Image (tube, grey):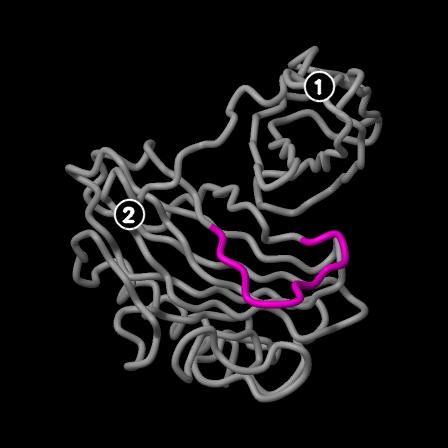
């Protein structure tokens, strides 16, 4: 396929996605019955989201039923890959409480190849990173299917909300990639995930420059994992720290801008925004 025809195909795909039927909530999709409004897109270099049954490598089979979305069903992903999986468009006009969840199984090169979940409220003109917990493991792989869920309130009032899974790899060391199954949007307040221990930690100074300090609001003898993500969802720094006393995190190489800091201890993961000032 020529470059011109490929771009024409991509533009037609985005047009179909943007003008697709808006789906009401709540919503559940186990991917057993075809696309149902989900659309993959890739850069044409051989790494893509496939719907079916993974049959090779570390991540074999679906979470439920026989089918799921998987990066390259029959083999490893390629180098310098970038591929997307787009959801249908959803109506959040009168949804004040919502919980988005899905199951995932993955094996990647830790810190270099990753999955980002993003949302758009303007027909795909801009995409915002959604900090789903559990998508990046210290070893780059999960030992089983895990569920990742996020409570969202900022989507309330939008009549056209779309999500996408973005997978990116670097130039070397390739593995199985990610599998996604049983995507759900719940609107029942009793089912919606509550942000656990939102006051678990605090950051100061914020904005920061060169370093910042983690203050543990509930000091203990546990170990916490602190990760820093850029707004594309790429993890760029990880530290293991004790939850007593306060912990200083050195960040001399971060460029000015906005980042997300995750703080994980026990089964709780909390995200807070970090601003980096110019030097």
Image quarter of residue 159: top left
Along the horizontal axis of the image, is 270 left or right of 206?
A: left
Q: Residues within 10 Å of mark 1 (few under 14, many from 20)?
A: some
| Nearest the eye: 29 or 236 | 29
Q: Secondary structure at mark 1?
A: loop
Query: How far across and how far down the image is residue 80, in percent?
Result: 70, 66
Q: Residue at x 59, y 23 (%)?
A: 200
Marks 2/1: CA distance?
A: 39 Å
Query: How far across and how far down the image is residue 129, in percent?
Result: 50, 43
The answer to whether residue 146 is magenta is yes
| Nearest the eye: 270 or 51 | 270
Q: Which residue is mark 1?
A: 219
The part of the chain drawn in magenta is 137-148
Q: Which residue is mark 2?
A: 161
Image quarter of residue 252: top right
Query: How far across and how far down the image is residue 11, in percent?
Result: 36, 66
Q: Residue 132: which numbered mark, if any?
A: none
Q: Residue at x 37, y 61 (%)?
A: 183
Along the horizontal axis of the image, is 156 left or right of 131?
A: left
Q: Is residue 111 above or below residue 219?
A: below
């Amino acid at each position: 396929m020529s470059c011109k025809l490929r771009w024409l195909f991509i533009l037609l795909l985005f047009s179909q996605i943007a003008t697709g039927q808006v789906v009401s909530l709540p919503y559940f999709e186990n991917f057993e019955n075809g696309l149902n409004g989900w659309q993959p897109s890739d850069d044409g270099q051989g790494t893509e989201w496939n719907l079916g049954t993974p049959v090779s490598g570390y991540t074999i089979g679906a979470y439920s039923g026989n089918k799921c979305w998987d990066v390259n069903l029959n083999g490893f992903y390629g180098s310098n890959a970038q591929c997307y999986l787009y959801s249908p468009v959803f109506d959040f006009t009168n949804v004040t409480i919502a919980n988005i969840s899905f199951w995932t199984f993955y094996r990647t090169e830790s810190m270099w190849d990753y999955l980002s979940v993003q949302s758009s409220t303007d027909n795909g003109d801009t995409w915002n990173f959604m900090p789903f917990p559990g998508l990046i493991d210290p070893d780059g792989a999960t030992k089983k299917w895990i569920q990742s869920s996020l409570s969202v309130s900022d989507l309330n009032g939008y009549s056209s909300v779309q999500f996408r899974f973005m997978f990116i790899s670097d130039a070397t060391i390739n593995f199985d990639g990610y599998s996604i199954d049983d995507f759900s949007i719940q609107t029942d307040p009793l089912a919606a995930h509550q942000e656990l221990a939102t006051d678990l930690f605090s950051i100061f100074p914020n904005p920061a420059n060169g370093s910042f300090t983690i203050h543990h609001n509930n000091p203990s003898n546990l170990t916490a994992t602190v990760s820093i993500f850029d707004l594309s969802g790429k993890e760029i720094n990880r530290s293991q720290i004790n939850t007593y006393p306060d912990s200083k995190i050195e960040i001399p190489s971060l460029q000015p801008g906005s980042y997300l800091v995750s703080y994980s201890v026990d089964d709780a993961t909390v995200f807070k925004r970090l601003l980096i000032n110019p030097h």
